[in-house]
Amino acid sequence: MKIGELAQLSGLNASRIRFYEAQGLIRQVERQANGYRRYPAQVLQTLKIIQCAQQAGFNLEELKLLLPNSTTGEIRHAELLTALLRKVEQIEAMQLHLAQSKAQLLGLIENIEARPEGMACGENAERVLALL
């Protein structure tokens, strides 16, 4: 299929598909006599994997481990599993950090809202900052 059709089916811009090809995420495609790229149907599946992986937070280098080997087409199961487990660990660390940040912000909000009656905002800000 031509790049326009692939772009339409995948929901990606043609320039994004060419970028993925240049980055080695899509195997080299056949060029027709007129210079047009001709993509095999399985590239659509590869693009869907790329989109899902990016939504899960994988960068381009990490993505390369998730995709089949560019020369053999084989999936590197051990590398894939390692990459997925590492990403889960990163997400869990991020969740912990976000939970701590949320708790700090909620404590700050609580302190701001506990402003003594009649205290001006500026004084309250100094009071809250002194508690930090």
Image (spheres, rainbow, N blue to C red):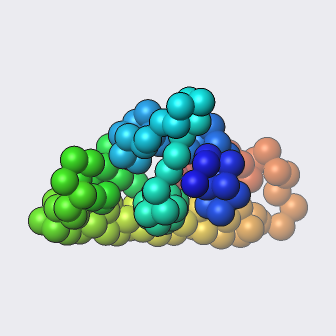
Q: Residue 119 vs residue 5: left or right?
A: right
Residue at position x 60%, y 68% in the image: 106
Residue positioned 40% across, 47% down in the render: 26
Q: Position of residue 50 (x, y in %)?
A: 46, 57
120 relative position to 97: left or right? right
Q: Residue at x 36, y 46 (%)?
A: 27
Task: Choose between 125 and 36: the one closer to the eye.
Answer: 36
Residue 121 visible at all:
yes
Left/right placement of residue 8 relative to residue 105 reads right
| Front residue of this view, candidates 112 and 77 | 77
Q: Residue furthest left?
A: 78
Q: Position of residue 132 (x, y in %)?
A: 51, 51
Q: Is residue 15 above or below residue 44?
A: above
Q: Which of the two residues, 58 or 77, is positioned nearer the viewer here?
A: 77
Residue 128 visible in this rendered orientation of the protein: no
How many marks are shown on the rendered structure? 0
Q: Quadrant of residue 90?
A: bottom left
Give me the residue at 40% from left, 36% from top.
23
Residue 108 vs residue 81: left or right? right
Residue furthest out toward the front: 33
Q: Quadrant of the N terminus?
A: bottom right
**Rendering coords of residue 86 (x, y %):** 24, 62
Rendered location of residue 44, percent (x, y): 51, 62
